[in-house]
Image (spheres, coloured by chain):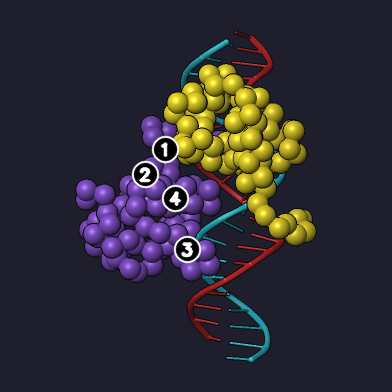
Chain colours: A purple, B yellow, C cyan, D red
Amino acid sequence: MIKWRPSHLWEEVAATLRTRIESGQYPPQTRMPSIRDVMQEFEVGKNTALHALEHLEEQGLVVMVQSQGTFVTPREEWPQA
Amino acid sequence: MIKWRPSHLWEEVAATLRTRIESGQYPPQTRMPSIRDVMQEFEVGKNTALHALEHLEEQGLVVMVQSQGTFVTPREEWPQA
DNA sequence: GAGAATTTGTACGTATGTATG
DNA sequence: ACATACATACGTACAAATTCT
């Protein structure tokens, strides 16, 4: 059903979110858009939204807490940044 | 559809596979059971089988190679073991 | 405090892409 | 040409804890 894709959806989503974090649009300690929010804004499935957020978590930019949300990590803990 | 589960399926699957690796049942350099194999043996879905293998990869016990399979890491590279 | 909604996590199913054998 | 195998991507459902009304 999907024609042709130069890159990966979850990477694009993660890259966009990362830019917003680093630009201060999502300040540290605050809550990121939820999985559902990401699904709606980027029009992707849950797996893709989740994968993108998990990728940011692996990079240490955010922390996902069950039942609470995804929170931006304090700048001090960011990698190189 | 699922009643109640004390722990997590993917953890049980990963634990079982890990035991087999450490016991030498799956020797280093050789190919592990594929995702499909894991699905059939443990009677789990693809996501669960994949998640279990990815967990082993994060632990450094195996390496997943696209189109080839999942291979056991040499003992020297195992964590603590 | 009660109930509804939200949110992450787990789990299942399916289809397609890409590379290998 | 075909089967295999991992990777990506879609959808759905339920659980558990938290948050909001």
Q: CA separation, marks 1 and 4?
A: 15 Å
Residue A7 position by quadrant = top left
Determine the chain carrying the residue at label 2: A
Asked which secondary structure carries label 3, the reply is: strand
Q: Which mark is residue A12?
A: 2
User: Is residue B33 found left or right of A12 in the rendered image?
Assistant: right
Q: Is residue A44 visible?
A: no
Looking at the picture, does residue B79 appear above or below residue C18?
A: below
The percent coordinates of residue A47 (x first, y second) are 53, 48
Q: CA separation, marks 3 and 4?
A: 11 Å
- Quadrant assignment for the N terminus of chain B: bottom right
Q: Earlier in the sequence, mark 4 or mark 2?
A: 2
Asked which secondary structure carries label 2, the reply is: helix
Amino acid on which disc 4 is placed: Glu
Q: Earlier in the sequence, mark 3 or mark 4?
A: 4
Residue at mark 3: A65
Q: Say which residue appears at 52% left-offset and 30% top-offset.
A: B62
Same-chain status of marks 1 and 3: yes
Same-chain status of marks 3 and 4: yes
Q: CA separation, marks 1 and 2?
A: 6 Å
Q: Are marks 1 and 2 in contact (CB under 8 Å)?
A: yes
Nearer to me, B55 or A57: B55
Judge depth for marks 4 and 2 and give the one in front. Answer: 4
Q: Earlier in the sequence, mark 1 or mark 4?
A: 1
Q: Are marks 4 and 2 in contact (CB under 8 Å)?
A: no
Q: Which mark is residue A8?
A: 1
